[in-house]
Amino acid sequence: MSNSLILRNIHSLIGIEEGDVLLKKGAGMAETGILNNAWLLIIDGKIKSFGLEPYNIADFSEKEDQTISDRKFVNSLQVIDCAGKMVFPSFCDSHTHLVYAGSREIEYIDKIKGLSYEEIAKRGGGILNSAKRLHETSEELLTKDALGRLDEVISYGTGAIEIKSGYGLNTNDELKMLRVIKALKSLSELSIKATFLGAHAVPAKYKGRQADYVDLIVKEMIPRVAEEKLADYIDVFCDKGFFNPDETSRMLEAGIACGLRPKIHANELDYSGGIQTGVKHNALSVDHLEYTGDAEIEVLLNSNTMPTLLPGAAFFLNMVHAPARKMINAGLPIALASDFNPGSSPSGNMQLVLSMGCIMFRMLPVEALNACTINGAYAMNLSDKLGSITVGKIANLSISKQIPGIEYMPYYYGSNKLDTIILNGKIIKSGIPA
């Protein structure tokens, strides 16, 4: 029995779900299983069992039909004493642009002065600025910098993450980004999903020729990405000033034909038709959604698509807030993700996202936790493996410091409330400073 670990004296084990629960929606978002004064056993990187203290030695059997009658195995376990601490599933951050070159703090000053997202983009800033920098940066340096960012988000409790391309905007540089993400998959303990986002913006050289750029994506980029098996998903920025629903449909259909399921940017800047387009093509998620009305809610209710809100971008850009409360009351699920990127959400701290869900969207702490864990996992097609305390799931867990309860996590925003991180059943960081 290798890689065996037991968490003892857990003050609160939070996020317990049955194996067939893959997402939480509507009123169910405010519900989760909680066990106080608990233990949890990890064997070979997975959650083996859990229960109330004191533990029963029979629960530690490696096989269901085998009972351990001596204490040899029990004495070999690595023990973590969680007295006064909470244990919950690691965050699943389903929308990031974590691979990038350089920062964009000068544009931040432009925003303070009142320039809009679209105005900065028209001046060659925004995504086009990041594309220029990425073109000039080697894969090796991009990988090194991204690993540093991954270490940071791990320290705040992220255990699974989706990373998009989209700062290449030409075939070679998009492939470069996706190769970096592939390298990160092999170098990090995180569960990582890769998304091809060649349609993040229209390059300057295609100004006035947007249809030609769509042709390039469909006829050259997507086949190359599929041939090299570099992406799990395809994304399009379907919004005002970027790509319209017809262009989006064409690119998504080309991606689907190559085995890439859609995950799209939609309705961040206006009622763009992006939500309807995503649902039409069975998108795994539609993300941003600041402009979501009754028609969009109705479409989502009749779909398997996860509505994903990105409060960091709304906060940083001072945008209108997505109607999260209305969406939940209508019966929808909600996922929360960081949108970690250098231009509109320069933070991958999911503890802060959890707080923003409560402060900006009026979500209850348990609703926000479900949005950051099991629903985020669903938005990466990983909720059968991650996102809850469930026997058989991968042991990606966070252990808090000694705090009063789950409500304290979003309430005490701005500091790291975690003490220990466990990924794939391994202790990754212990005693993380605040």
Image: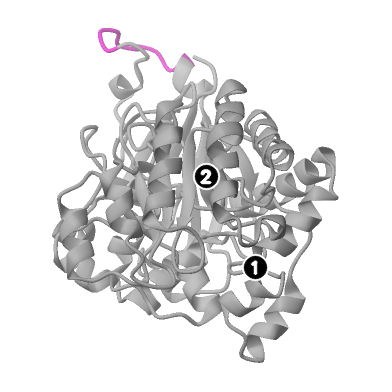
Given residues 329 and 204, the one toward you in this image is 204
Residue 10 x %, y %: 39, 48
Instruction: Please identify the residue farthest to the bottom as the structure is shown.
Output: 113
Q: Quadrant of the C terminus?
A: bottom right
Q: How many marks?
A: 2
Q: Return the mark for residue 162.
A: 2
Residue 36 visible? The answer is: no
Q: Residues within 10 Å of mark 2 (few under 14, many from 20)?
A: many
Q: Amino acid at mark 2?
A: Glu
Query: Within the image, what quadrant is residue 292 found in?
Result: bottom left
Does residue 300 appear left or right of residue 189 in this picture? left
| CA separation in Å, label 1 and label 2 | 18 Å
Residue 131 x %, y %: 73, 55
State which mark lies toward you, 1 or 2.
1
Q: Amino acid at mark 1?
A: Gly
Start-end of magenta stretch:
64-72
The structure residue drawn at horizontal position 14% and vertical position 65%, both measured from the top left corner, is: 330
Q: Is most of the magenta stretch helix, strand or loop?
A: loop
Query: In the image, is residue 70 part of the stretch drawn in magenta?
Result: yes
Residue 402 visible? The answer is: yes
Residue tagged 1: 343
156 up-or-down from 197: above or below: below
Query: In the image, is residue 269 part of the stretch drawn in magenta?
Result: no
Q: Are the two marked residues, 1 and 2, in contact with CB atoms closer than 8 angstroms?
A: no
